[in-house]
Structure formats: C-alpha cells, structure tokens
C-alpha cells in the first residue's frame, strides 16, 4: 500500500468475498461478494441492510474472528493476521461471562493483559461509574436488566481503549427508550476521544442519527455495498431530537429509497426458502 | 405483600415437612403392625418378621451401634472410601473431559473406547480390583472411581462443547490466550455441568464403596451387612441399610451446600427478575 502510516485508514476491507461451504461439502453459500469498505481515523460508519445480508459476517472479518475467502483486511495500514488487536467488539446477543460479576467482566480484558489486580480493579470501578453502574459492581449478569448488561458490555470493551469499535446491532434487543439513552451515551463516550466505529444495524434511523457515513448493503446472498452516504448533520447530536430535523428526513427518504428494493428482495427470498 | 408471601411460603414448607414426617411414621407403623402378632397369628407375624425384620429391633440395633461405638470405625472406612473415589474420580473426569473436549484428535481417537468402557457394567470389575488391590480400601476406591469418572467426564465434555460461541468470541476479542480461555471460559462453564452431576456421582462413589465392601472386606458398613446376612440377622441388615441411607442423604446435602456457595452466578428459578 502506498499510504504513509499516518494517513492510512483505521480499517480497510478490500474486495472481501466470504463463501461458506455446507457441512460435508457440496453446496456453497456466498454471504458477501467483492465488498470494499474503508473507515477513516475517528470516523463513525454505519452499515445497514436487510436482515440476513451478511452484515455480521463482514464485522467478523474485520475483527479477525473469521477469515475471508478472498480479499484483504488492513488495520492502520498493516495487514490483519488473527484476532484484530486494535479493535473492541460489542456483540448483538449477551456476551458477558455469566460467572463473573459486572466488575469481573469489566476488568477481564485488563487481567488478560496482565495488568496488576489492584490497578485493574480501580480502572474497572472507574469505568463502571462512567456507565452509571457503580452501585451494581457485585451483581452477576442475570441480575442485571438488558440496558445494564449493554452498559457493562460497553465498559468491558472501552476499558481496553481500542482504536476501532466494531458494534453488531448492539442495542437491537432493547426497548426504544432505553435504546435512545444508550445511543446518546455511546455518542458522548465516542466524542470524548473519537475512535473509528463500524456500527452494524438494520435500523436506518439509528444509522443516520449516529453516523458520519452510512453504507447500504444489498440483500444476500452475495451482498455488496449499494450506496455510500455522507451524513452531514451537525454534532453534537441528540438521537431523539435529530430525528425531527428537516435534513434528517431528507437523508432518510433518500436512503430508504435505495434500501427499499433490497428489503423487498430479501423478504421475497426469505419467503421462498 | 412480599413479607406475607414469604411467611406463607415458610408455613407451606413447615406443613410439607410435617407431611414428610407423617409419611415416614406411617411406613414404620405399617411395618410394625405387619411384623408383630397384634393383628394376626404369632406364626404369620414371625414369618413376615423373618423377611422384613422388626422395626423396633432395627432401631435398637442402630442405637447399640452408635451408643456402643462399634459403628464409627466402619462408617469412617466407608466415608474415606467414598470421599477418595469421589475426589479422584471428579478430578480425573474434569481433567480428561477438558483435554478431550479441547483436542479433536484425541477425542476422535478415544471416542469408541470411552463409549465401550461406559457401556460396560463396571460393578463386575469389583472382583478383579479385589485381586489387583487386595481387600483393603484401595479396591473399593478403584470401583467407586470407575463409576464416578464417567459421570463427571461426560458432563465436562458436554459443558465445554456447549460454551456459548458468543461468550467465547468475546473473550478472544478481549485478548485471552488459550490458557486464559481455559481458565476463564471453559472451566467455569464445565463446572456448572459438573456440579449438576455431583449429586449423582457422590451417590455412585458411595455405591462403589459399599458394593466393594460387600464383595470382600474386613471393615466398613457393607462388611457389617454382609456378616449379618450370613447369620440371617435381617434386623441388622435393615439397620445397616438405614444408616447408609441417612449417610448418603448427609453427603448429598453437603454437595448442595457447596454447590450453592460456588454457583452464585447461576440464575435460580424465580430469582431472575432484574433489579
């Protein structure tokens, strides 16, 4: 690559194709075809698309949890091998370790890194306070509500200070009010030290409200980017209020236009199966 | 409201305990009436008593054992055998289970042999162990071990296989190396399965000890029962069975206490409501 290190994008997926082979060989399934996605330093990019279009697959490639069939991944200009050490991952479903308390979960990454226990505990308490859970440090995940679990997961990821945040529909299981609260909290934490974010969602409004850029993916199989839209809404934003801005409505109409056909296509395919 | 519900629940439990006691007393009374010449002829009562023993004599035998101190030595031996078989079997089951679950090659290689050894009726090994290890406690521990090992092994294997892939990926993204994954993800997940199997396996360790003693030994509760059977002393046989049952219940309770202590993170039914 000809990028000098300082201007290399935080994350670059180049011509990624992912093909799964069914167990016992035979049929193959191409989830993502020839997809290129670049995320700049400090940029908040959302990827939207109909359900089952391979959004999560793409994110797992960026995380290094999955290897692509073709194409390359570069993290800050360096080719990615194995787990992406610069990235934090927030999962769609519950990913907290059920046998560890909220505190234990938050300090886990530091412990893996061999941080001295006292210091790890102090930092973890600090992060729990930042996500508003100081009083719940000793609780186990099953004793926390959905929103609290997401906050713990957020602190668990952010305590390691990753350069890149990979988020896979992190708030899709929450009710709409909790969800907007969490989105605002995320924006606030993000604006403090602009990390690069890849945010996967199927919710167009959420994508526009949060992002600098929205990439629309086509319906699977063989999903690929259909459109790339710059969201020029001013920051700081309040996700509940920004939805009422005229520019938001304009952008939403424009993006929905692109997405609608794909959603219908995806729906038709899922009905045929 | 909550307080009322709680005290109601406590009252319900109290009533249940009363019913439990009444049921037990009922069985004893029935046993007593059937074996004493109160309802029918002395001849018939004596015949039933020959097969079923007399409850009062049984209780008297138990009293003599404990008051006279004769039982303690035998109980201690049985206890040591049970605990050794339980501890060694659980540790080996845990180790081998983790190893095979995390190493596909070893697991594929060992699979048919594990299945075969599990399918084999292992109590039949008792005489062989007696030949190998003599009539002391080692042969009983060996028998209990073969019974405990497979229960724990299969549970650990299952526990590791059923680790949530999301939790596993999360730990990997947080930077866990394979040793840290084993310690913080696989082992705790397997432990919750192991604990659910401990009730069965402590019972099995006990079976191993008693059956081993019964087949050949010089001490232990199984030995007492064997001796009494040789003399057609049915009352002592029943006394031995009662002592063993109480003993097994006590062990099971101990497991429950340890389990509740170590598995605080596991949601109990009805306790999952978020705060």
Image (cartoon, rainbow, N blue to C red):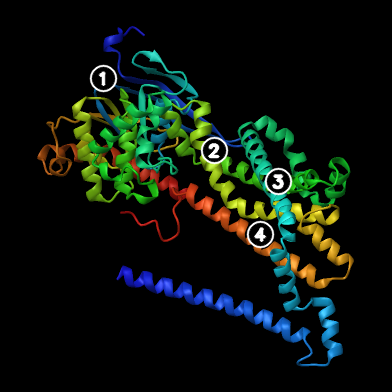
| Closest to the observer, B96 or A78 | B96
Q: Quadrant of the image for the N terminus of chain B?
A: bottom left
| Closest to the observer, B81 or B236 | B236
As drawn, which residue projects farthest toward the left?
A246
Identify the mark nearer the N-term, 4 or 2. 2
Residue B85 numbered tag: 3
The residue singled out by tag 2 in the image is: B187
The residue singled out by tag 4 in the image is: B248
Residue B230 appears at what percent x and percent y? Answer: 89, 65
Residue A89 appears at what percent x and percent y? Answer: 37, 31
Q: Chain of mark 2?
A: B
- Camera-near label (2 vs 3) is 3
- Camera-near label (3 vs 1) is 3
- Camera-near label (1 vs 2) is 2
Identify the mark nearer the N-term, 2 or 3. 3
Tell me if label 4 and label 3 are in contact, CB under 8 Å: no
- Camera-near label (1 vs 4) is 4
Q: Is residue A91 above or below residue B46?
A: above
Helix, strand or loop at label 1? It is loop
The residue singled out by tag 1 in the image is: A41
Helix, strand or loop at label 2? It is helix
Residue B206 in view of the camera: yes
Q: Chain of mark 4?
A: B
Q: Residues within 10 Å of mark 4 (few under 14, many from 20)?
A: some
């Amino acid at each position: 690559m000809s990028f000098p290190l300082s201007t290399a994008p935080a994350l670059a997926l180049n011509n990624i194709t992912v093909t799964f082979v069914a167990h016992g060989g035979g049929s193959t399934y191409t989830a993502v075809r020839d997809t290129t996605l670049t995320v700049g330093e400090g940029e908040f990019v959302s990827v939207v698309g109909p359900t089952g279009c391979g959004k999560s697959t793409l994110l797992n490639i960026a995380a290094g949890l999955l290897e692509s069939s073709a194409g390359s991944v570069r993290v800050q200009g360096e080719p990615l091998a194995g787990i992406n050490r610069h990235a934090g991952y927030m999962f769609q479903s519950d990913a907290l370790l059920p046998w560890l308390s909220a505190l234990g979960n938050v300090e886990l990454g530091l412990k893996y890194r061999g941080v001295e226990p006292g210091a790890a505990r102090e930092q973890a308490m600090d992060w729990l306070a930042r996500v508003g859970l100081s009083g719940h440090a000793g609780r186990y995940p099953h004793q926390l509500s959905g929103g609290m679990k997401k906050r713990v997961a957020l602190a668990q990821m952010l305590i390691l200070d990753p350069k890149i945040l990979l988020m896979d529909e992190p708030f899709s299981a929450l009710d709409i009010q909790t969800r907007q609260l969490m989105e605002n909290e995320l924006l606030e934490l993000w604006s403090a030290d602009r990390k690069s974010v890849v945010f996967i969602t199927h919710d167009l409004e959420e994508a526009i409200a949060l992002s600098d850029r929205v990439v629309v993916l086509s319906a699977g199989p063989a999903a690929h980017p259909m459109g790339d839209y710059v969201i020029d809404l001013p920051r700081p934003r309040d996700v509940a209020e920004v939805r009422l801005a005229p520019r938001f409505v304009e952008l939403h109409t424009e993006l929905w236009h692109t997405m609608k056909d794909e959603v219908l296509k995806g729906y038709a395919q899922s009905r045929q199966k | 409201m909550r307080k009322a519900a709680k005290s109601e629940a406590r009252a319900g439990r109290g009533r249940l305990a009363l019913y439990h006691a009444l049921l037990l007393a009922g069985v004893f009374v029935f046993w007593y009436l059937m074996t004493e010449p109160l309802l029918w002829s002395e001849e018939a009562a004596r015949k039933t008593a020959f097969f079923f023993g007399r409850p009062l004599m049984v209780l008297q035998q138990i009293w003599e054992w404990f008051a006279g101190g004769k039982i303690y030595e035998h109980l201690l031996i049985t206890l040591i055998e049970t605990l050794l078989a339980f501890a060694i079997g659980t540790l080996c089951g845990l180790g081998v289970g983790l190893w095979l679950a995390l190493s596909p090659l070893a697991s594929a290689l060992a699979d048919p042999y594990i299945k075969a050894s599990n399918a084999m009726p292992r109590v039949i090994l008792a005489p062989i162990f007696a030949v190998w290890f003599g009539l002391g406690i080692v042969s009983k521990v060996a028998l209990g071990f073969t019974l405990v090992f497979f229960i724990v092994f299969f549970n650990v294997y299952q526990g590791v296989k059923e680790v949530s892939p999301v939790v596993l990926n999360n730990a990997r993204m947080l930077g866990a190396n394979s040793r840290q994954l084993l310690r913080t993800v696989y082992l705790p997940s397997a432990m919750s399965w192991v604990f659910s199997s401990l009730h069965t396996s402590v019972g099995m360790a006990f079976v191993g000890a008693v059956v081993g003693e019964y087949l050949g030994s010089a001490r232990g509760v199984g030995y007492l029962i064997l001796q009494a059977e040789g003399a057609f002393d049915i009352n002592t046989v029943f006394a031995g069975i009662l002592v063993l049952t109480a003993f097994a219940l006590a062990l099971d309770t101990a497991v429950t206490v340890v389990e509740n202590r170590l598995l605080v993170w596991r949601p109990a039914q009805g306790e999952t409501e978020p705060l």
